[in-house]
Amino acid sequence: MNMLTLKIPELLSEKLNVYAKEKGVSKSEIVREALLEYFSSEGAVKSGAFYDMAKDLAGTVNEAPDLSTNKKHLDDGYGQ
């Protein structure tokens, strides 16, 4: 088995230590499982509607509610 050394932020290190103690496993085992999960789901096709996959982004833009009917924005050249 190969060895990997990496630098992680203090907060992540603390969380890893606490989790390892709670689960009774080594930090190395947690990182190995996390990497396996990451690489196994990387190529997975996500199912569901587009909104379901991007709902965390909905409502994050502060613009006019409907540029298509707002005459002021039409005069500004939007949609041209």
Image (cartoon, rainbow, N blue to C red):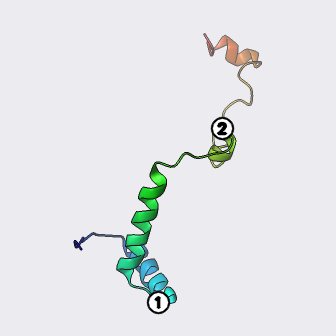
Residue 24 has which mark? 1
Out of 32 and 72, give the one closest to the viewer: 32
- Residue at x-position 43% and y-position 86%: 25
Q: From what the image shows, is residue 44 above or below residue 37?
A: above
Residue 65 has which mark? none
Q: Amino acid at mark 2?
A: Asn
- Labels 2 & 1 near each other (Cβ < 8 A): no
- SS category of the residue bearing label 1: loop
Give the side of residue 5 with respect to residue 14, left or right.
Answer: left
Query: Please, which residue is most extreme toward the right here?
Result: 69
Count of picture labels: 2
- SS category of the residue bearing label 2: loop
Quarter the N terminus occupies: bottom left
Marked residue nearer the N-terminal end (2 or 1): 1
Residue 28 falls in image quadrant: bottom left
Quarter the C terminus occupies: top right
Residue at mark 2: 62
Q: Nearer the viewer, mark 2 or mark 1?
A: 1
Give the side of residue 28 with respect to residue 80, left or right.
Answer: left
Q: Amino acid at mark 1?
A: Gly
Q: Are there few (<14), some (14-19), or many (20+) residues within 10 Å of tag 2?
A: few
Q: Are there few (<14), some (14-19), or many (20+) residues within 10 Å of tag 1?
A: few
- Residue at x-position 71% and y-position 29%: 64
Residue 29 place in picture, x, y as percent: 39, 78
Residue 59 falls in image quadrant: top right
Out of 65 and 48, give the one closest to the viewer: 48
- Residue at x-position 75% and y-position 15%: 71
Q: CA distance from mark 2 to mark 1?
A: 46 Å
Residue 46 place in picture, x, y as percent: 58, 46
Give the side of residue 56 with respect to residue 28, left or right.
Answer: right
Residue 52 place in picture, x, y as percent: 68, 46
